[in-house]
């Protein structure tokens, strides 16, 4: 993790705050470059930092049988890592792993708690965001249980596309099998189907989104529901 001085705040949560509140928060932060596979949180361990992704994405993983992991959320510049602190809980229930490397604004847990106590505006903003996160987790569970793998993969690719701010990103079959909770052969079949429809190009882990509109049609309704919920709640 490399450190830099903060010169901007391209994070939607921070951008939504009143200017004075935002500047007050940024004064207690620095920026870090997150590397792919960095672990930011572990289940039942103290949360040391809060992260506001700017050009990175973080996968939130739930542990299954103590060793396997299933992705229940993907956080980019629309959100934050460390939401348990909003509720006054000092430990995480999930594992947070960097899925797309890039920058993030970071604040210590102690500093975050102080800012949360003295800023009603920050508290209101994060309460709304926490509601959105809970809704997204519920949507993810429903999606995993009821929707076809090809549609689920299309949804995940759209979510990653939004957060990568690029038409191309890298993810292996092995990672996708863990993210989606299926065997690698299932991932291969679903990715091949999307590629045969000319929606994506997929070579050795390098994915290129070639038809965004078509991919949206191939996705289950969960993707549109997640986006609509965020805009509806966070715009209040």
Image (cartoon, rainbow, N blue to C red):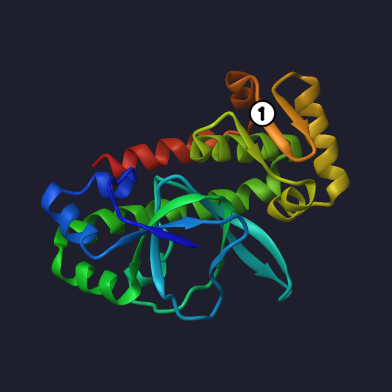
User: How far from the left and from the top, in percent, is residue 98?
Assistant: 56, 57
Residue pictured at 65% horizontal, 21% vertical: 210
> Who is closer to the viewer here, 186 or 95?
95
User: How far from the left and from the top, in percent, is residue 99?
Assistant: 59, 52
Residue pictured at 80% horizontal, 38% vertical: 204
Residue pictured at 71% horizontal, 76% vertical: 66
> Who is closer to the viewer here, 51 or 158?
51
Q: Is residue 119 left or right of residue 180?
A: left
Residue pictured at 68% horizontal, 53% vertical: 179
Residue farthest left in this picture: 20
Q: Is residue 79 left or right of residue 128?
A: right
> Who is closer to the viewer here, 24 or 62?
24
Q: Is residue 71 left or right of residue 86?
A: right
As drawn, 88 above or below 11: below
Image quarter where the C terminus lies is top left
Residue 222 seen anywhere in this rendered image of the structure: no
User: How far from the left and from the top, in percent, is residue 224?
Assistant: 51, 33
> Who is closer to the viewer here, 33 or 18?
33
Element on which disc 1 rests: strand
User: How far from the left and from the top, in percent, is residue 38?
Assistant: 58, 63
As drawn, 189 above or below 84: above
Residue 56 seen anywhere in this rendered image of the structure: yes
Badge 1 density bin: few <14, some 14–19, many ≥20, Cα 10 Å? some
Name the residue beneath numbered marker 1: 208
């Amino acid at each position: 993790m490399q450190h830099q001085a903060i010169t901007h705040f391209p994070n939607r949560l921070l951008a939504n705050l009143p200017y004075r509140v935002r500047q007050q928060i940024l004064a207690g932060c620095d920026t870090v470059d997150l590397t792919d596979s960095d672990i930011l949180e572990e289940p039942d361990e103290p949360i040391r930092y809060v992260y506001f992704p700017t050009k990175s994405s973080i996968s939130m993983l739930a542990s299954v049988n103590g060793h396997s992991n299933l992705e229940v959320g993907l956080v980019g510049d629309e959100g934050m890592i460390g939401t348990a602190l909003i509720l006054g809980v000092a430990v995480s229930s999930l594992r947070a792993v960097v899925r797309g490397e890039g920058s993030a604004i970071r604040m210590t847990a102690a500093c975050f708690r102080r800012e949360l106590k003295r800023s009603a505006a920050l508290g209101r903003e994060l309460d709304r965001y926490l509601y959105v996160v809970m809704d997204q987790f519920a949507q993810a569970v429903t999606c995993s249980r009821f929707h076809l793998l090809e549609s689920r993969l299309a949804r995940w690719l759209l979510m990653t596309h939004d957060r990568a701010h690029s038409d191309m990103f890298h993810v292996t079959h092995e990672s996708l099998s863990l993210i989606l909770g299926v065997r690698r052969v299932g991932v291969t079949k679903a990715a091949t189907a999307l590629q045969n429809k000319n929606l994506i190009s997929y070579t050795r882990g390098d994915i290129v989104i070639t038809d965004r509109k078509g991919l949206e049609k191939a996705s289950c309704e969960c993707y549109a529901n997640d986006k609509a919920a965020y805009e509806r709640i966070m715009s209040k």
